[in-house]
């Protein structure tokens, strides 16, 4: 059976979608061919690299990719992880299952001290739980996963 193709999209492709891509790849292995992209790509955030390193997953060599890089490609699943990405998500050929997992952007935390890094850890853990649900229960074409965190 060929690997299912998954595209995970957020606005910057700097944290949320990068973390989700790495977690799907780590947990699913060869069962999924997973990519991430951003509607307005930025650099991968240092905090995202750090919190993934805590799980022994290295995303330090990953680059943010523009959504246009994947135009016209077929995917089994297209997952948006922020509202801006959902609003700007184009149609893809092949009628992929579209899922929306809205996560707050931890980069918007401006409180002093470790609060921002804590927000990145919390995001990672929420995404990890969501990915596990997707892989265990929801990766069979159901689109009722839209608002779970």
Image (cartoon, rainbow, N blue to C red):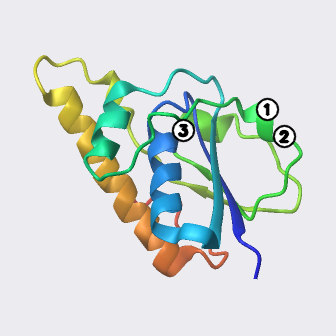
How far apart in space, not on screen, are marks 1 and 2 (Cα)? 5 Å
In the rendered image, the vertical position of residue 101 relative to residue 117, given as above or below:
below
| Visible residue check, residue 144 | no
Q: Quadrant of the C terminus?
A: bottom left
- Other-residue count near label 3 (Cα within 10 Å), few / some / many at <14 / 14–19 / ≥20: some
Horizontal and vertical percent position of residue 21? 53, 51
Horizontal and vertical percent position of residue 98? 68, 58
In the rendered image, the vertical position of residue 117 relative to residue 121, given as above or below:
above
The residue that label 1 is drawn on is 68
> Can you tell which mark lies on residue 83?
3
In the rendered image, the vertical position of residue 91 relative to residue 62, given as above or below:
below
Horizontal and vertical percent position of residue 113? 10, 21
Horizontal and vertical percent position of residue 91? 82, 47
The residue that label 2 is drawn on is 71
Closer to the eye: label 3 or 2:
2
How far apart in space, not on screen, are marks 1 and 3 (Cα)? 18 Å
């Amino acid at each position: 059976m060929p690997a299912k193709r998954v595209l995970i999209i957020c606005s910057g492709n700097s944290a949320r979608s990068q973390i989700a891509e790495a977690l799907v790849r780590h947990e699913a292995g060869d069962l999924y061919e997973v990519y991430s992209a951003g509607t307005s790509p930025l650099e991968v955030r240092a905090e995202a690299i750090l919190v993934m390193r805590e799980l022994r997953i290295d995303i330090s060599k990953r680059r943010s990719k523009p959504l246009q890089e994947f135009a016209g490609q077929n995917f089994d699943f297209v997952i948006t992880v922020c509202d801006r990405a959902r609003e700007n998500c184009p149609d893809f050929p092949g009628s992929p299952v579209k899922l929306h997992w809205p996560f707050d952007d931890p980069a918007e935390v401006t409180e002093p001290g470790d609060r921002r890094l804590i927000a990145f850890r919390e995001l990672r853990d929420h995404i990890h739980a969501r990915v596990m649900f997707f892989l265990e229960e929801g990766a069979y074409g159901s689109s009722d996963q839209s608002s779970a965190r």
